[in-house]
Each structure stands twice: as C-alpha cells, then as structure tokens.
C-alpha cells in the first residue's frame, strides 16, 4: 500500500466518523415528563378494566431465571393470561448480568419492550428515568392502591423525581415482587455449644463474638474478594452507630449530609477492631463471596452477616441449624427490593402493562412467591411458613418494614459509589487506610456527585 | 488487442472492493465511531454533549486510570518477558536433547492455550484461595508462614494474576520457539562445536539469532494479550484488592456497561489501541532492523 492510498483510506475513515451525528441524537426526544404526570392525563385517562382493552401483546423482559424465581413467574404469567385471555404475554428472560448490559440498548430503540425489570439504582432506573424512557406510575398507583400495598420504606426504592436527579422520593416508577434484608445469620448448634442465645443487643453480639473467639471458633465469616460483600457488613454496622436519616441521605446521594462524622468513624473503627481482634477471618480480602458462605454452611464460623437471599441455599445444607435475625440492637438493616418491574414510556399499552404489574404484585401473587420459598415484599407477615430459617426471614422482614427501618444499599449513593466503597473497604480492612482516610475517600465521591447533581 | 495480465492496474481495486467493504463496515467504521464517541460525554441513553479532549485529559489526570495502565505494563513482564525466557530455555533443551516423545511434551506445554481463559481464571482462583492448593503446598514444605489469600493481598495480587499469564503464554512461546529452532541447520551447530563453543555459547551465537523472527511474533502476540487482559482480572479479582489489579480493558467494560460513561470508556479503548499499536510496531521494527 503506497502513501497516497494509505492517506485516502485514512481520510475515508475520518469522513465516515464525521458523517455520523452526535451519539444519542437518533433517539427521539424524551417524552416531556410533565405531560405524563400532569393531573389532566391522570386518573381519568387510566383504565383498569384489563379485560376490555382488546387484543394486546405485552413484551416483558425479566431476569427471574433461577429455579424458584422462574417457577413463580411462569405460574403468575399463566394465571394472568387465563384471567385476561385478550392479553398475551411475550416473555423474554435473561440472567441478571445479561439484562443489565442489554437493557440500555433495548430502551433506546424505537420499539422497546412494554415491561422491563430494571435495577433500582442510579446507573439503571435513575438513568432511564432521566432519559424519559420509563413511565411514571403515580396515576396507576392511585387507581390500584399500590401506595397502600407497599410500606414507605419499600416505596422509596422505586421512587425518583421525573428528572432522575432525586432518588428515594418523587414518582413511583416500578413495582418489585420480592424483598431483601441483610441481617445476622447464625449457626444454632454452635451457639448452644458456646452456651449462648442469639444476641439481641449490639453489646451481646460483641460478647458472643469474644466468647466464640476464646473457644477457638471463627466468630464471623466474610469473603470480600469480590469487593461488594463488605458493603453489606459495613452498612449493618453503620446502622448501629449512625442515625437513620443521615444514612438515608448519604445512601440516596442527596445533599445535606457528610461521611466525615464521629459516628461514621466509630462504625469504620468497629470493622478495624473486628479485624484486630480476629473476629473476622484473616483472609477477608482473599476469600471469594460464594466460598465464604459455603464454608459457613459447612460449619465454619458462628455468625455471618449476609442477605436474606442466602437463606434458601444455606437452609439446604444447614437445615434448622441455620438462624436468621435482624442486626442485634437498633432496628435498622440494609435492605431493599428485588428488581422492580417498570413500564416503558414508549409502550403503546400502558394500561395492560399496569394491569400486569398489579397482577404480579397483588396479595395472591405474594402467596405464590411464598409457596416458591421467596420473600414477598408486601403482606410478609400474613404468609404462613413452617418454623425455621425461612420463618425467621419472614419475621425479620415484616418487622423491619413495619418500623421503617430499611436502609438503602450504600452503593445506591452515586453511580460510582459501588466501586469507591468496595475498594475503600478493602483498603480499610487491610489497614491500607485509617478510618478517617476511608471516610475522606467516600466523602470525595459523594460530594462530587451531589455538587454536580444539583 | 492484448493486454498484459492484470492491466489496467486500477482493476485491482475492483477486486479489493468486496473485502474492503467488509473490512470497512466491521472494522473501520466501528473504530471511527469509537473515536467519535470518545470526544463526547455520553451516558448511552440521552443526547451526548461535546467534550473535546476532556476524556483523554482525564486519563492522564486520573491517578486510578494511570495506575490501570501501569498494571498493564507490569503484566507485560509476566505475559511476555517471562514466558519468552522460559520458552527459549525449554525449547532449547527439548530441541537439543532430542527427547523421546517430543510431541507429547509439546502438547502438554501447549495445553493451557487451548483452555478458555475463563476456565483458567476460575481454576487459578481456587489455587490461590486461602484454603487452595498453593497454600497447601507451602504448608507441606514447611513454609506455612507464607500462606495467605493471594488474590486479596495488596503486594501479591498483581504478580499472582501475572503468573497465571505466564503459565498461559509459556506454552505458546515454547511451541513457536521449537518450530523456529527445528529449522536451524545442524551444520551451524557442528561449526560452532568445532570452534569450541559450549552449550551456552552455542545458544547465544547460533540459536538465539536464528529464531529472531519467531521471537518477534511471540512478543507481539503476548504483549497484545498482556495489554488487553480482561477476562482474567474480571474473574479473579474484579480489580481488587483496592484498585491494585485494575487494568484498562476492565475499565472500558466497567465504564461503558456498568457506569454508563460511554465517552470515557471509548477514550480508554482508543488510548489502549494506540499503546498496543505503538508497542507492537516498535517490536517489529526492532526485529526487522536486527535481521538486516
């Protein structure tokens, strides 16, 4: 290839690039959110008589692919279509990761699915709301009474202001089916052997950890190779030291709080103490998350701070040996919802989509979730389950939502916070950073976001 | 009227056209588009805003991103330099000793290359875990004091990831070197022997210069592999502990798909492409020059 051809090719490549217009400009302008949420198009325009909507095909993208999740989804879809023969559900399910990466493209196309499961946080639901790709559901929420169905501490996880800037308040954009709460998992047999009761106060818990250590047991297991598991442990500890409203402000990335407080320092120091005293296993940063809870299931460790989603699997290996409670002490626990189902702004069938959302989250649907061993987000205390870890989980979730004690996952705070906090916690526990330095790192990320978010 | 075959010359472009069209559609256009994206601030959803060279400036200004490129350079040592040293030695021995069952050894050495990187990464994650086989081995030989969760250790995580690369690439390099060495005429060795060269001298005077071409190929392949490392880091450490194993390719994925910073991701991708291009160009330039 001689020089002139090479130049011509290069010029061609540049011309190709230049001819393309600004990224995102091919997408139609975002629907003006005021028109969607204005009272004039509010309740009056909403139709809840799904049977009278004529022939409708709803395309639904979900990530309920695992055993029990898939079973409940299939059961509910079948029941829905039996009740409304005029509505056909076209279900597309992918794994969580696949959904995460494809949803962005799907939503910016001209014919997005009608209903999608979108992760609550800012990088997903927040970004979609901001881009005008999701429909605010307030009118439907009023018509169907959704705000009575869910407690406020659950509703906050699906609420955004229409500009996508404020998370935790504003309009409702999605409907979750399942609940989640991070609490204290414990090995009953080991506790009995140590002569201990499940702790009910934070001081009790510390004493139990010490006693376990003295007896030569591993008091608390954590596998943080994957970076995020320690976020749940820190969130749990923070709930005991820091006032709830402060955590909510920080967690939802709102203006008006700071990480650099004496209370947060105490919480960070607690983790360092646990490392120093050997309550946490030495290799926290080198142990994988799955490996850590599996080891706990096989009898390593007396306590494990983890999410309710572990109970199904751990219950299989530990049976009634497994216990679960809210974090001992102040009723505050990190938790939230499974991925909420949302209606896309471009869907031509919002009424049918809303009817579907209503159907898969009503009281009967919650029963179906329970039957499949899942934790329903609403009516939790009205379900009947047999004694054991599952019952513990239902009791814990019902109690914490009743007391409005759910705290947001801390990585909701800013689009980059999962990374920042994950890496900072590894630094903290490896003693690469002092609690003060750790908090300064978090503060920097939080402040940068809050300032730019306005 | 007869024309010499291939005339007029411009007809050649017509023949090139189909291939070029495919090349342009699937390679040149996406590259151009990536370059264009890198000049915007875009979340992948809403209208992008022009950012000029801000995304590139950020790569230099952002300490964590600079570190990521630094880690890739460290990995180059483990992916390229080390396998080359080991591969040359192994090939020289295998070639020289005329071992019986050479084919067998060649297959064994090459085996890591045929296993998917994800599988390799999952396996090594087990090896490095705190109750994994590496620690078991250390304890068995009385070095239990050194045992640790390797991938969670700030000092050792990056070298640990690097060693997997060494293990992975050594086979490829060895087989390449073996192929090169088998072409060396025996007379050359004979002449060297007659001149009184020992095995070491022989290696540097005869073997090494003869496989220069293969070395260039091996280095190009392994250096590129080092700089684009993604799957290994994604599976084993996710960039941790802290950010001590983050690499540019991982950042590209993370920013584009998880954080929605498409412009920044594209800028890193373009920069990485340039770095790879410059380094492989230098390697080949170097190899060419020393031949002539």
Image (cartoon, coloured by chain):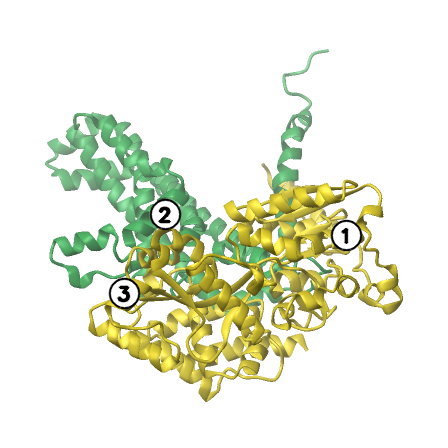
Q: Residue at x 32, y 73 (%)?
A: A197
Asked if both marks, 3 and 1, belong to the same chain, the answer given is: yes
For the residues labelled 3 and 1, say whether their Cβ atoms are less than 8 Å apart: no
Between the C-alphas of marks 3 and 1, the distance is: 61 Å
Disc 2 designates what residue? B122
Q: Residues within 10 Å of mark 1 (few under 14, many from 20)?
A: few
Q: Colour of chain A?
A: yellow
* Residue at the far bottom in the pictured view: A262
Q: Nearer the viewer, residue A29 or A375?
A: A375
Is residue A73 depicted above or below B65 in this figure? Answer: above
Horizontal and vertical percent position of residue A443: 51, 80
Horizontal and vertical percent position of residue A403: 56, 76
Confirm whether residue B259 shows in the render. yes
Determine the secondary structure under disc 3. Answer: helix
Q: Nearer the viewer, mark 3 or mark 1?
A: 3
The subunit letter for the residue under badge 1 reads A
Horizontal and vertical percent position of residue A132: 75, 61
Q: Image check: B259 left or right of A353? A: left
Q: Residues within 10 Å of mark 2 (few under 14, many from 20)?
A: few
The subunit letter for the residue under badge 2 reads B
Determine the secondary structure under disc 1. Answer: loop
Disc 3 designates what residue? A190
Q: Which mark is residue A26?
A: 1
Q: Which mark is residue A346?
A: none
Q: Nearer the viewer, residue B14 or B153?
A: B153
The subunit letter for the residue under badge 3 reads A
Chain that the image shows in green: B
Q: Image check: B267 left or right of A31? A: left
Asked if both marks, 1 and 2, belong to the same chain, the answer given is: no
Q: Residue at x 85, y 68 (%)?
A: A38
Q: Image check: B72 left or right of A445? A: left
């Amino acid at each position: 290839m001689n020089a002139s051809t090479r130049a011509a090719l290069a010029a061609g490549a540049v011309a190709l690039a230049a001819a393309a217009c600004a990224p995102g400009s091919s997408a139609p302008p975002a629907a003006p959110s005021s028109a969607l949420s204005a009272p004039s198009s509010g309740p009056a325009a909403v139709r809840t008589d799904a049977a009278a909507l004529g022939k409708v095909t709803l395309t639904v993208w979900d990530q309920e692919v695992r055993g029990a999740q898939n079973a409940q989804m299939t059961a509910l879809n079948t029941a829905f279509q039996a009740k409304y023969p005029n509505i056909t559900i076209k279900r597309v399910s992918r794994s969580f990761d696949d959904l995460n990466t494809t949803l962005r493209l799907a939503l910016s196309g001209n014919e997005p699915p009608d209903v999608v499961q979108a992760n609550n946080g800012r990088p997903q639901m927040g970004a979609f709301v901001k881009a005008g790709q999701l429909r605010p559901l307030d009118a439907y929420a009023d018509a169907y009474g959704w705000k009575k169905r869910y407690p406020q501490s659950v509703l906050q996880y699906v609420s955004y202001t229409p500009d996508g800037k404020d998370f935790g308040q504003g309009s409702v954009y999605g409907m979750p089916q399942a609940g989640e709460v991070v609490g204290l998992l414990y090995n009953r047999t080991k506790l009995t052997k140590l002569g201990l009761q499940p702790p009910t106060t934070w001081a009790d818990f510390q004493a139990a950890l010490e006693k376990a250590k003295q007896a030569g047991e591993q008091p608390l297991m954590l596998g943080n190779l994957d970076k995020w598991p320690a976020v749940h442990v820190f969130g749990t500890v923070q709930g005991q030291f820091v006032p709830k409203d402060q955590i909510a402000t920080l967690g939802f990335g709102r203006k008006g709080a700071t990480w650099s407080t004496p209370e947060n320092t105490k919480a960070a120091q607690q983790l360092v103490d646990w490392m120093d005293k050997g309550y946490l296993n030495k290799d926290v940063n080198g142990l994988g998350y799955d490996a850590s809870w599996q080891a706990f299931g096989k009898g390593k460790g007396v306590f494990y701070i983890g999410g309710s989603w572990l109970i199904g699997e751990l219950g299989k290996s530990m049976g009634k040996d497994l216990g679960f409670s809210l974090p001992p002490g102040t009723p505050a626990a990190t938790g939230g919802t499974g991925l909420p189902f949302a209606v896309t702004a471009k869907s031509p069938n919002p009424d049918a989509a809303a009817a579907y959302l209503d159907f898969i989250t009503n009281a009967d649907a919650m029963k179906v979730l329970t039957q499949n061993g899942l934790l329903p987000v609403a009516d939790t205390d009205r379900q009947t389950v047999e004694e054991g870890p599952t019952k513990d989980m239902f009791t814990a979730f019902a109690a914490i939502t009743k007391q409005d004690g759910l705290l947001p996952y801390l990585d909701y705070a800013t689009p980059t916070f999962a990374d920042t906090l994950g890496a900072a916690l590894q630094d903290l526990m490896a003693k690469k950073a002092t609690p003060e330095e750790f908090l300064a790192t978090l503060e920097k990320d939080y402040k940068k976001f809050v300032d730019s978010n306005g | 009227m007869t024309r010499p075959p291939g005339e007029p010359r411009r007809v050649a472009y017509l023949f090139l056209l189909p291939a070029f069209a495919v090349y342009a559609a699937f390679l040149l256009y996406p590259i151009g588009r990536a370059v264009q994206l890198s000049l915007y601030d875009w979340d992948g959803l809403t209208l992008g805003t022009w950012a000029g060279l801000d995304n590139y400036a950020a790569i230099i200004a952002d300490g964590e991103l600079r570190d990521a490129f630094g880690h890739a350079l460290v990995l180059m040592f483990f992916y390229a330099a080390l396998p080359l040293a080991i591969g040359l030695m192994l090939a020289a021995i295998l070639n020289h000793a005329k071992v019986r069952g050479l084919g067998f050894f060649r297959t064994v050495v090459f085996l890591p290359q045929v296993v998917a990187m994800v599988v390799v990464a999952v396996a090594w994650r087990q090896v490095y875990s705190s109750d994994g086989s590496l620690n078991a081995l250390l304890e068995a030989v009385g070095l239990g004091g050194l045992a640790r969760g390797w991938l969670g250790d700030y000092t050792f995580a990056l070298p640990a990831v690097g060693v997997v690369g060494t293990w992975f690439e050594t086979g490829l390099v060895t087989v390449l070197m073996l192929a090169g060495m088998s072409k060396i005429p025996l007379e050359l060795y004979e002449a060297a022997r007659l001149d009184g060269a020992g095995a070491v001298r022989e290696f540097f005077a005869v073997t090494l210069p003869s496989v220069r071409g293969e070395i260039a190929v091996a280095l190009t392949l392994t250096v590129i592999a080092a700089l684009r490392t993604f799957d290994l880091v994604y599976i084993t450490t996710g960039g941790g502990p802290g950010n001590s194993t983050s690499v540019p390719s991982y950042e590209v994925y993370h920013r584009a798909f998880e954080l929605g910073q498409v412009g920044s991701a594209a800028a890193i991708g373009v920069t990485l492409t340039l770095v790879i291009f410059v380094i492989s160009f230098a390697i080949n330039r170097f190899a060419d020059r020393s031949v002539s």
